[in-house]
Every structure is written in structure tokens, then in C-alpha cells.
Amino acid sequence: MALTGTYLRTLDDKRRLAVPKRVKDDFAEENLDSLIIAPGTEKSLVIYSPKGFDQFAAKLSSAPEHQRYMRLFYSSAERMEFDSQSRVRIPDRLAEYAGLKKDVYLLGVQDHAELWDKDAWDAFTTAYTPEFDQLALRAMS
């Protein structure tokens, strides 16, 4: 099932993110005990299940001309285990890369989730929501 939805979350002082049960279930991976967190585009973070990360890695490996991107991406990616309360810790360097403060949005984006600072996501939606129809037409053509 495709990951969907927008969840406003609050990072605690240790930068732990509580992952909603629905999101965890939508990763559709039995015995999911960890997530892979890596830098995304536009100062966001991408979050994959281990199997989803392997599928993404397989796509990347078929394009060796992207060696610089792969080097930066893989060296920053981290596997983070869930604690007993279904929280994962966001590594400091990734939180700094994405400019995460206390309030964040966790977004379902088909095969992965994204994590955005609240202010950055609000600015993104303000900028691109007026273009939704044009973006949709390009995506569907």
C-alpha cells in the first residue's frame, strides 16, 4: 500500500520522533523494528523501511553516473531502531541538515516517508499548492 498522509509531530529533547501506527503499518513490512533515515531533497529527510531502502538502492545501483550523489547519500543514511514507544531518534547531523526544530511534519510519499521542519513544509505548500493542477497534469502525462 502506498504511504499517504500528513502528520504533525513534535520532536522531544533527544530528537525522537513518534511514528504513528498507521505509518508503521503502511510500510507493509513484518516485524518492522527499524527505519533508514537519509537526506532528501529540499532540506527534507527521507525515511524508508529496510526492504524499501534495498529497493531504492537497487534503482540507484543501475545508474553509476550518480556516484557523487550516492557517496553523499549513503554516507549520511542511518538505520535507527524503534524504542518501546515506536519512536526513532533522528541523528543530529541529519536533523541539522533538514533544519529540524521541535515541530515537524511526517509525510507519506508513496514508497517512503519524508520528514520536514514545520516552517519549511508550510512554506513549500504555500509556494506550490497554487500550482497543484499543473503539477498533476505533468505527473499524469
Image (cartoon, rainbow, N blue to C red):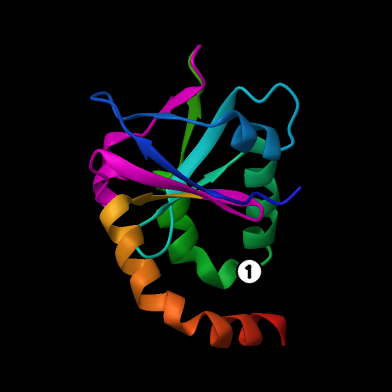
Residue, x 68% and y 60% (percent of image)?
59
Q: Residue 26, relative to residue 133: is it above or below?
A: above
Q: Position of residue 98 (x, y in %)?
A: 30, 52
Task: Name the residue at the top extreme.
Answer: 84
| Residue 134, quarter of picture | bottom right
Q: Kindly identify which residue carries mark 1.
A: 63
| Residue 140, quarter of picture | bottom right
Residue, x 62% and y 61% (percent of image)?
60
Q: Nearer the viewer, residue 138 or 44?
A: 138
Q: Position of residue 20 (x, y in %)?
A: 54, 31
Few, some or many C-alpha atoms within 10 Å of disc 1 (few <14, some 14-19, many ≥20)?
few
Q: Is residue 71 left or right of residue 10?
A: right
Q: Which residues are magenta?
A: 84-113
Q: Nearer the viewer, residue 14 or 106?
A: 106
Is 23 a magenta residue? no
Q: How many marks?
A: 1
Q: Residue 122, relative to residue 53: is it above or below?
A: below
Q: Position of residue 39 (x, y in %)?
A: 41, 52
| Residue 44, quarter of picture | bottom left
Q: Nearer the viewer, residue 46 or 138?
A: 138
Q: Is residue 88 left or right of residue 126?
A: right
Q: Nearer the viewer, residue 94 or 12?
A: 12
Q: Residue 10, relative to residue 119: is it above or below?
A: above
Q: Position of residue 4 (x, y in %)?
A: 62, 51
**As shown in the figure, which amino acid type bears the numbered disc 1?**
Ala
Q: Is residue 95 left or right of residue 74?
A: left
Is 91 a magenta residue? yes
Q: Quadrant of the C terminus?
A: bottom right
Q: Secondary structure at mark 1?
A: loop
